[in-house]
Amino acid sequence: QNARLLCFDRDGVELTKTSKRLAPLASKIELEAVHANYARVGDELAQRNVRASCLLADLGCSSMQIDDPERGFTFKRDGPLDMRMGLAEATAAEFLRRASIKEVAAALRDGADFSRRDAREIAVAILKEPIPTTTTLLADRVRAVRLEEDCSDDDAVKRAMQALRIVVNGEFDALDELLASLPDILAPG
């Protein structure tokens, strides 16, 4: 037994499920579940004085997160506007309460490739009082915007929710941090 597998997940609920699924491998390899964002891989490996010979990063959210309306990742069933992968971050509703139109529009451009005009129009609609606190209220606000770009209402909602999820969870920053750490964490060869 000389192989070691470290599994990182910022979502404690999903990490527990994954640990149970991987448990049968424990007789063949050393397994360790780490409750942390993958941005922390470099720090966690340094603490263990190991380097990785292989790294697989699963970006985005899982179907298990989307399937649970209480997590706030889907508009197909009403749920709180949460979208957190871990519990340390502010919810999407909290982000919207403190964000400016400019910040929301930037998130929509960066995380969903909306044009400047469409991103601003969606941001203005979303930030009308009262700020939406559920997924279906957010979806209704996005659907009400007349976009210059040709896309279906549901496509626009999916993209807007993706952009909010990315900003709420700091996904681009986490990916940048992971990529920057690669030279230090990967074993030679």
Image (tube, helix red, strand yellow):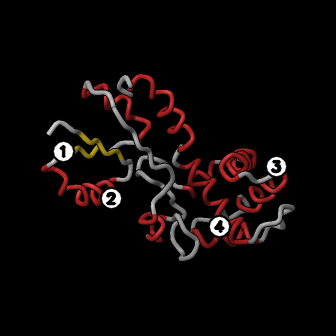
As measured in the structure, the alpha-carbon distance from the residue carrying label 3 to the one carrying label 4 is 19 Å
The amino acid beneath tag 4 is Leu
Q: Earlier in the sequence, mark 2 or mark 1?
A: 2
- Nearer the observer: mark 1 or 3; the answer is 1
Q: Which residue is mark 2?
A: 13
Residue type beneath disc 1: Ile
Q: Which mark is residue 138?
A: 4
| SS of the residue under disc 4 | helix
Give the residue type at disc 2: Val
User: SS for tag 2?
Assistant: helix
Which quadrant of the structure image shows residue 21?
Answer: bottom left
**Which residue sits at x=29%, y=57%?**
18
Earlier in the chain: of badge 1 and badge 3, it is 1
Q: Give the image location of residue 67, x and y in percent.
A: 45, 71
Which residue is disc 1 drawn over?
29
Residue at the limit of the structure toward the front, as seen here: 189
User: Mark 4 or mark 2, which is nearer the start of the sequence?
Assistant: 2
Separation of marks 2 and 4 at Cα, in angstroms? 25 Å
* Closer-to-camera residue (65/103): 65
x 18%, y 44%: residue: 29
Q: Nearer the viewer, residue 14 or 185?
A: 185
